[in-house]
Image (cartoon, rainbow, N blue to C red):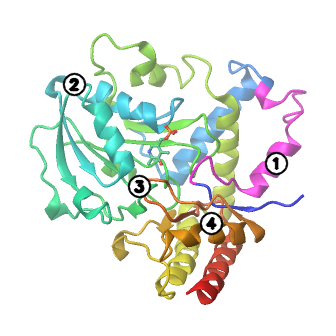
Amino acid sequence: MSRVFNFSAGPAILPETVLQRAKDEMLDWHGSGMSVMEMSHRGKEFQSIIDQAEADFRELLNIPANYKVLFLQGGGTLQFAMVPINLMGARKKADYIVTGAWSEKAVSEARRFGAVHIAASTKAEKYTHAPSQAELDLSPDAAYVHLCTNETIHGVEFFGVPQTGDIPLVADMSSHLLSRPMDVSQYGLIYAGAQKNVGPVGLTAVIVREDLIGHVLPGMPLMLDYATHAHHGSMYNTPPTYAIYIAGLVFQWLKDLGGLTAMEKINVAKAKVIYDAIDNSGFYVNPVAKPDRSRMNIPFTLPDAALDAEFLAGAKERGIQQIKGHKSVGGMRASIYNAMPMAGCQALADYMTEFARIRG
Ligand SMILES: *Cc1c(COP(=O)(O)O)cnc(C)c1O
C-alpha cells in the first residue's frame, strides 16, 4: 500500500489512524456483528455513536450550553439557504461580508429570501484580504451578519472576529472548523460541510444559539427548519450515519492529540513551511495580505502558467497530488487541513524549492 500526500481542497485527506480504525471496525462494530453502515439509526449502538460524537465536538470547541449542535446534510451550500430561511425573520434584511467565491455564493442564495446589504467586499482587490472592523458598513437593522471565515478558493482567513453588537454573526467555517480554538460565544450560528477539515462528505455541522431557532419563514419544508432537527436530536429523518461515525473518530483523534490548541500549533508550523517556500523563492506568488493568509488553503502561482503542467507532473512523481489550483484563480493550491502531516508539507516545500531552482 502506498498513500500519497493528498492536497485536495475537499473531499480531502483524513487522518490515517482514523481510516485504520474504521477499517478494523468495518465488518463488526464493537461486537454488534454489523458495520455502522448497516445499523438502524434508532438503535442504542448508533445512539451511543452520535451522542459521543456530539459530546466530543462540544468539548473540543467548548460550545456553550445554550447552543444546539445539529448534524445535517446538504453541505455548506444548503446552509447558504437555510441561514436566511431561518434567520431573516421579520427584518427581511441581512448584511454580508464578501471576501471570496464562497461568500459570493452565500449572497446569491440569500437574495432569494430577503434584502442583502454588502457590508464589505474585497472583490476590487481580487479577494486578497480580510476587511478590518473599520472597513465594515454594518446596518443597524440587519437580521444577521454573514461571513466566510476561511475562503477555501482565495486563501483568505479571518483571525479576528468582526464585532456586530446585538446582531448575530453567522460564519461559514467549512474549511477551517477545528483547525484552532474558536470562541463560539461570539457567533449566533456556525456551519461547516464536513468534507474539508472534519470528516467525510455527507455531513454538515451546524452550531446555533437556541434563541435563533424557531423563526423560520412561512411555507418552508420541515427539513429546512432548524427547529425540526433541534427537536429530534438531528434524527427527524435518517441522518448520515457513517459520516457522523467517521467525524466522531476524527474528534477522538483531535482529543488524543491534545485538542485544538495543540492542533493550532501544528497547523501554524505546517503553513509556515509552505509560505516560506513561496516567499523565499522569488518565483512563486501568493497574493493574500500576510496577516490574512489562510493556514488551511494556500493558493500560489508560478511566474508563467505554461510551467504548470510540468510542475504538476513532477509533483505527482513525488506522491504530491490534487494540488492544481481552482480554475477561477489558476496556478496551484495546497490544502493542508488538520490531517495533512508535516511530512507532506515538507515534501511539497522541498519540491517547490527544487523546481524553482531548476526553472527560475
Ligand atoms: C466547500 C465549501 C462550501 C460548499 O460545500 P458543499 O458541501 O459542496 O455544499 C461552502 N463554503 C465553503 C467555505 C467551502 O469551502
Residue nearest the observer in this picture, 212 or 15 = 15
Find out whether the residues at labels 2 and 1 contact each other: C-beta distance under 8 Å.
Answer: no
Which residue is rendered at x = 46% and y = 84% of the image?
Answer: 279
Alpha carbon separation for disc pair 4 and 2: 50 Å
What secondary structure characterizes most of the magenta part? Answer: loop
* Discs 3/2, front: 3
Please name the residue that numbered disc 4 is placed on.
Answer: 309
* Discs 3/1, front: 3
Residue 166 shows up from this direction: no
Q: Position of residue 82 (x, y in %)?
A: 37, 28
Q: Magenta includes 13?
A: yes
Element under label 3? strand
Residue 96 shows up from this direction: yes
Which residue is rendered at x = 47% and y = 61% of the image?
Answer: 330
Start-end of magenta stretch: 9-37
Q: Residues within 10 Å of mark 3 (few under 14, many from 20)?
A: many
Residue nearest the observer in this picture, 106 or 32 = 106
